[in-house]
Amino acid sequence: MVLLLTAGAPPPLLPCPAEAGWELVAKARLPRRGANGEPSGGFSAASYQSDTDALLLLSDAPQGSVAAWSGVRQLGEVPLRPLFQLDLLGSPRAPLPAEIDGEGMVVLGDRLWVASEGRRNAGRVAQLLAFDRASGQLERAYPLPADWQPAPGRGLGANQGPESLALLRRTAQADVLLMASESPLLQDPPAQVRLLGWTLGPFGAVSRPLARLAIPGGAGWGLTDLLAVDAATPTPGLLALLRRFQAPDQWQVLLAHYPLPDGRADPGVVLEPIHQWDLIAAGLPPDNWEALTPGPAQADGRGSLLLASDDNFNANQDNHLALLVPRRSAPCHRNR
């Protein structure tokens, strides 16, 4: 996922009051096959570009690719139009593993930043990957910190992250990529996921631990995407997309609002949600919702959230898109 910043203050992205919740204003499905007849899906991260009304979707297929679609402002009224597909490739200076599992994405300038999920083996390593946006070629791979590396009783679980990537941009500060694990590291308490900050500088990305996020709802919940909100205001925060699957076919989806961690605080600090919303109750079809990005501004000035689901290339699931708009009272409109 990505937060794309344009001139001027972005429209408000949170309900006000929080209890007002979200309105589902549009939804659609993407085709299960591309123009070449090959299966299309596995969409695990999204980036909406408001200047061109284009949606980029990262697929977690083993080779990895980014598909672009136009027509989001008319979502649900006319079918989205495919623009192109960019395959993610290795390069002579940075070979790509035979299989990756791209789960988070930030588009920043001429670069695609991708969080690749691991399997606790040398063939499927969890990493932060930097690709050239035009060619799709890998420029550099960054290993995760030692605490996240697989070791007996330690590190990320297999297929348990990192699942998310978000951009945090603040005035007079370096850009930071926010990365979270899907589930607790093996050495950590239950229902707590670690948040990592990658500071971007002239020589690449440097990681440091920021905090832990308390995951509501009990066992089985995982964090699938992050979004920084109100970063330029005195009360910046994080939105986290959470999901749980219970056999044989029950999906649950929550959106949780957290305070933004203070970079100077103890990285062991556990942040509790300020508020949370049940998105299935808000109208989302029950499915594997994984991607979260700011959507197009609405005619009344409100912002929106665009969500995408990952069909896992499974005939029993689908590639859904949904546009959510925060409900806001009249006093909230006057105060923003």
Image (cartoon, helix red, strand yellow):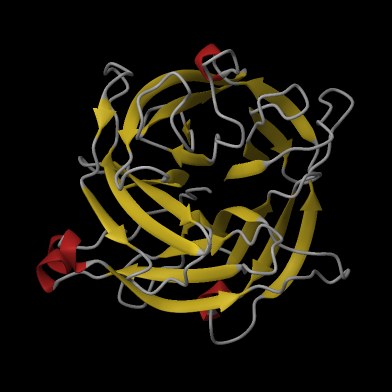
Image point 45% across, 26% down: which residue?
197
Q: Eyeballing the image, is 155 above or below 104?
A: above
Q: Residue 259: x percent and y percent? A: 25, 38
Q: Residue at x 21, y 42 (%)?
A: 235
Q: Is residue 313 left or right of residue 180?
A: right
- In the displayed structure, 224 sits above or below 269; it is below
User: Is 113 drawn above or below residue 148 in the view shown?
Assistant: below
Decide: is 332 above or below 276.
Answer: below
Q: Nearer the viewer, residue 248 or 322?
A: 248
Would residue 131 be found to the left or right of residue 144 on screen? right
| Residue 225 visible, this orientation | yes
In this rendered view, identify the residue nearer to me: 265 or 157. Answer: 157
Q: Which residue sits furthest bottom?
A: 77
Q: Position of residue 291 (x, y in %)?
A: 52, 55
Q: Quadrant of residue 299?
A: bottom left
Front residue of 50 and 66: 66
Residue nearest the observer in this picture, 233 or 329: 329
Quadrant containing the C terminus is: bottom left
Count of numbered circles on the image: 0
